[in-house]
Amino acid sequence: MSDGSASSNSKRNYAVQPHGSRQEGSAIVKLAAGAVGIVFGDIGTSPLYAFRETFVGHHPLELDKLHVLGVVSLIFWSMTLVVSIQYVTILMRADNKGQGGSLALVAQLMAALRRSKYGWLAILLGVLSTSLFYGDSMITPAISVLSAVEGLTVVEAGLQPLVIPIAVGLLVFLFMLQSRGTAKIGALFAPVMFVYFVVISTLGLIQIAQTPEILYALNPWYAVQFFITDGFKAFLALGSVVLAVTGSAALFADMGHFGRKPMRIAWFGFVMPALLCNYFGQGAMIIGLDAEGARAAIQNPFFLMAPEMLRLPLVILATMATFIASQAVISGAFSVTHQAIQLGFIPRLTIKHTSASEAGQIYIPFVNWTIMIAVIILVLTFQSSSNLASAYGIAVTGAMLIDTCLLAVLVFTLWKWKWWYAVPILAIFFLVDGAYFAANLSKVPDGGWFPLMVGGFAFLLLTTWAKGRKIMREHMAESAMPIEIFTKSAANSATRVPGTAIFMASASIGVPSALLHNIKHNKVIHERVVILTVNIEDVPYVEPEDRVEVTDLGDGFYRLILHFGFMQETSVPAALKKVKECGMEFDMMKTSFFLSRQTLLPSEKPEMMVWREKVFAWMLRNAATAMEFFKLPSNRVVELGSQMEI
């Protein structure tokens, strides 16, 4: 697998690329508005089902004042502790050069824990969190779109048979759009979500004005009283209450698109107040109804808050909002996959850039169609958003708990917090996130097994690829000939021919096998030979002036290392155009790229279990070629095969 890419262990320092965090004034307002349209869709559509599920889900509660106030109080304090304090206030400080998300956090910790005997555990937790994200990315579009389309039954009960076909049709359309990218429709996102948040907050405020006693729920005592009265049943209700804060991890992951300050302004100044108004409004409506009316209204309180003549427009608006929320989650899956490929946890996949100006807008066909198939199967299997809620939450709360673990490592290793204030803060986060995760374990038999199965399968693939890749590189390094010996012998023993030959090498030491095979079979050496390694650094972006590292080996031989961040596109031809230190400029029409392609053979003493070797070999065979991944011109590439045991 001498593909030319490698994670760097170097201590080079890279300038931070400004990525939205340094904008001031009106620019920050624009970024905050953009964040409303892109980032907050997932958590913003939770009112469609979160409050309802605590009363009609698999562990229903009584519809009385005590329980309504208790649930609304839990939602308010959960949103305050988990989203506002843990993610928006603290975790957003844990960015890696402006980028957020579990993998960016892991990349940041890798440098600090590289020599620690526990460093592998932090990396493993980050990989597990990423794996659980894939399960979440499949359920979110299904439950969001389905819950919005179910609003049609509030308008006209006879439309129930059309809910599933309409939802499936919308979801297929959504995934078909992905190849076109979000650049063209992105401008519509913010206005739609702005209107959506204004509408849901207005509906909530109307209900609060009619039943102001719902505001008692601001007092945490009502949440405590709920637990005192119901005990274990209240604990199980956390499995539904947590649906109100799903999407909080996505806020951290999407921070790099808009910057920390605009995200905080959007959340505290607009999104959080709108969501709380709606949740309090749903509770106020239920309290204000008699017992029979409350039982009928709790089946779909979000839509029943609106006057009858406005329910159809609200269904359309909510459907558009869930469409946008799903788009954000799918785009997030593309971004996470791209990061995982660059960091060496996933084999190369075909990546298409859908915008000439925005590097973050990418499309990965394999991920898109895999998620689409899973989403359609989920809709057809579970049939309703209420049934899907049984599967939703376990992956989200698992990822939240892992983020808390990584935060604990961060505050002691990098931030150097004093233990006497770090421990109480972390204890609260562990208590809250742990309680939510434990409560969601009760959902496993009813559908929670699905995201766990997806997460487990993804974790197996990610760890198998990382381990197999490490073993292959160790074997290649052991058998590599020192470059100094090779250049002295080869320069005089082979015929030199015009042109430039670039040999891609995964390691920055030794001679790549493609170069050895070329001399062995063709008996020639080009007048300029460049051994090229692409290093993916533990930072999101590497500035152009830090990109190139050249060593002149003499006799027309050069070792060239190109440094990229894990969020950047690895276009080798584009980078070579700016390289001036290799004797002369690179002319693609006079340059040939030589790649090695390994075939794995069974070993008498395998270093992985046999079944994992077979999985790794399958992943290696199906990985995108280095030619595609590094954007090499197809008519200038020569592949030379070799065999290897692992």
Image (cartoon, rainbow, N blue to C red):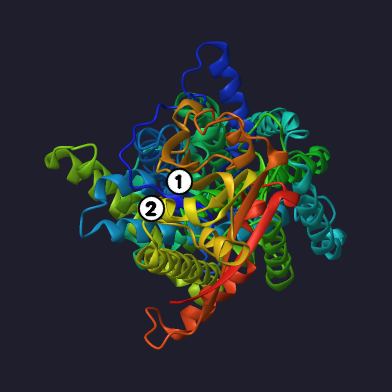
Q: Is residue 47 visible?
A: no
In this view, the residue in front, 333 or 621, is: 621
Q: Quadrant of residue 539?
A: top left
**As rendered, which of 635 and 612 lies closer to the eye?**
635
Residue corresponding to mark 2: 509
Instruction: Looking at the image, tell me whether mark 2 or mark 1 is earlier in sequence order.
Output: 2
Three-letter code, disc 1? Asn
The amino acid marked with disc number 2 is: Ile
SS label for mark 1: strand
Between circles 2 and 1, the one closer to the viewer is: 2
Left-right relation of 629 to 74: right
- Which quadrant, please, contains the C terminus? bottom left
Residue 632 in view in this figure: yes
Q: How many marks?
A: 2
Q: Would you say 628 lies left or right of 455 here?
A: right
Q: Can you tell which mark lies on residue 535?
A: 1
